[in-house]
């Protein structure tokens, strides 16, 4: 039986906003609960994954849109 992936709910905390402002990838990843196969919002610079990653269908490239959304929320909160 195949399971549907769960959509992760993320709360933008004050610690996440401070880590984002400081450019601290590790603290931001910890504050947001970024999984090892997900791109850090500090590394995401557009709504689409880089060209080299789009066609592989990797978990990293599939998580890109959610990371982009997080980055936009962090920029608005900062």
Image: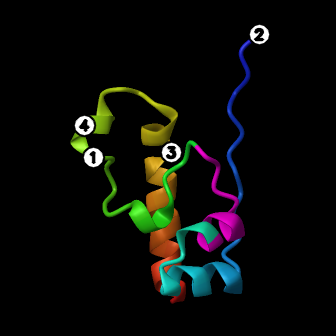
Query: Which numbered circle lies on residue 50?
Result: 1
Q: Does the residue at mark 3 contact the one at mark 4 (Cβ under 8 Å)? A: no
Question: What segment carries the magenta color?
Answer: 27-36
Between the residue at mark 3 and the residue at mark 2, the CA separation in whole angstroms equals: 23 Å
Q: Is residue 2 magenta?
A: no
Q: Residue at x 51, y 89 (%)?
A: 78
Between the residue at mark 3 and the residue at mark 1, the CA separation in whole angstroms equals: 12 Å
> Element at badge 4?
helix
Q: Position of residue 55 (x, y in %)?
A: 30, 28
Pick whichever of labels 3 and 1 is earlier in the sequence: 1
> Element at badge 3?
loop
Between the residue at mark 3 and the residue at mark 4, the CA separation in whole angstroms equals: 15 Å
Pick whichever of labels 3 and 2 is earlier in the sequence: 2
Query: Which numbered circle lies on residue 1?
Result: 2
Query: Which numbered circle lies on residue 63?
Result: 3
Pick whichever of labels 1 and 2 is earlier in the sequence: 2
């Amino acid at each position: 039986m195949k399971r549907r992936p769960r959509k992760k709910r993320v709360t933008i905390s004050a610690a996440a906003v401070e880590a984002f402002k400081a450019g601290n990838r590790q603290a931001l990843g910890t504050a947001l609960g970024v999984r090892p196969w997900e791109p850090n919002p500090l590394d995401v610079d557009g709504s689409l994954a880089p060209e080299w990653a789009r066609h592989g269908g990797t978990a990293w490239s599939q998580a890109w849109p959610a990371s982009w959304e997080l980055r936009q929320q962090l920029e608005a909160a900062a």
